[in-house]
Image (cartoon, rainbow, N blue to C red):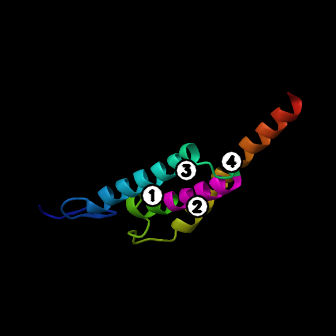
Amino acid sequence: MEAKEHKFHREEGFPWKHVLGLFLSLLLTAIAFWLALATHQPPALVITIIVILGVGQLLVQLYMFMHFTESDDRAWQVPAIYFGLFIVFCVVGGSIWIMTFKSIVA
């Protein structure tokens, strides 16, 4: 199979990196699912481990699928990560805030 050059990345043969990323993502998700449903650990421990698995999932997604290390122009990557963290903070923080308010009212 011939290598193809694109503006932002190269394709060389079978995408083993994507297959590995898929299996790692599935494995991390299965571990979190099993931990939440099949174990009888304290909730604080389960939440801590799921957060750690979530960070691992984030790193797998950034490296394997979003080609975070393959860009020639890396100047945009840091602001993009900060913007993504801001969005995550707004969604998660806002959700916790709304659920807390609802539990006080109801």
Considering only order in the chain, which callout, 4 or 1, is on the residue closer to the N terminus?
Answer: 1
**Front position in the image: 13 or 76:** 13
* Disc 2, SS: helix
Q: CA distance from mark 1 to mark 3?
A: 21 Å
Residue corresponding to mark 3? 35
Disc number lying in front (4 or 3)? 3
Residue 70: quadrant of the picture? bottom left
| Segment colored magenta | 44-57
Q: In the rendered image, which quarter is residue 78 located in?
A: bottom right
Alpha carbon of mark 3 to alpha carbon of mark 2: how far? Answer: 12 Å
Question: First in sequence: mark 2 or mark 1?
Answer: 2
**Residue at x-position 57% and y-position 62%:** 81
For label 4, the SS is helix
Where residue 91 appears, as percent x and y from the top left, is 67, 45
The residue at the far left in this view is: 1
Label 2 and label 1: CA atoms lie apart by 14 Å
